Image (spheres, rainbow, N blue to C red):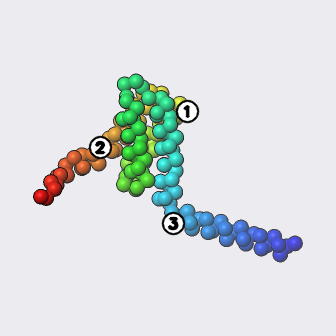
Amino acid sequence: MKKFLLILLIVVLVIIIALAVICSLNKQKIANYAVEKSMEMAKTQVMANLPQSVPADSAKILMDGITAKIKSGELDKEEVQHLVSNIQQAFSDGELDSTETVKLLDTIEKILEPAVAETADEPVEEPME
């Protein structure tokens, strides 16, 4: 019986060490996954609490755009932290009202704005004849 418990303890320790190594090597992927899941929840709440002054299509484009940037890893660490901080602040009382929705969408728009400006500045190549 003691041998069994000792072997079981060793197996459990090996599994714990393996998980710690995997988590430490994939820290950024795990963080991005958590942010992606929170963005899905935030998108649902934003769309449900959208004020009439904000078009639903516009809000959906912003939410999809920021989610795509997170998935692709295009956002730097500071932008992601700023976004997560704003999401946590908006949901701090357990509900998302229309004012918090607008503030969150404004934050997302500001984060996405440089990408829009960069694509607008690129010259359009005309097709050769």
Q: Nearer the viewer, residue 56 or 106?
A: 56
Q: Badge 1: how crowded within 10 Å, few (<14), some, or many (20+)?
A: few
Looking at the figure, which quarter contains the N terminus? bottom right
Q: Is residue 112 left or right of residue 80?
A: left
The structure residue drawn at horizontal position 24% and vertical position 50%, both measured from the top left corner, is: 118
Q: Position of residue 102 (x, y in %)?
A: 39, 31
- Amino acid type indicated by mark 2: Glu
**Which numbered disc covers residue 113?**
2
The structure residue drawn at horizontal position 49% and vertical position 39%, both measured from the top left corner, is: 42
Separation of disc 3 and disc 2 at Cα?
A: 32 Å
Q: Badge 2: how crowded within 10 Å, few (<14), some, or many (20+)?
A: few
**Residue on which the image places disc 1:** 94
* Residue projecting furthest to the bottom: 3
The structure residue drawn at horizontal position 69% and vertical position 69%, both measured from the top left corner, is: 13
Q: Is residue 12 left or right of residue 36?
A: right
**Residue on which the image places disc 3:** 25
- Amino acid type indicated by mark 1: Gly
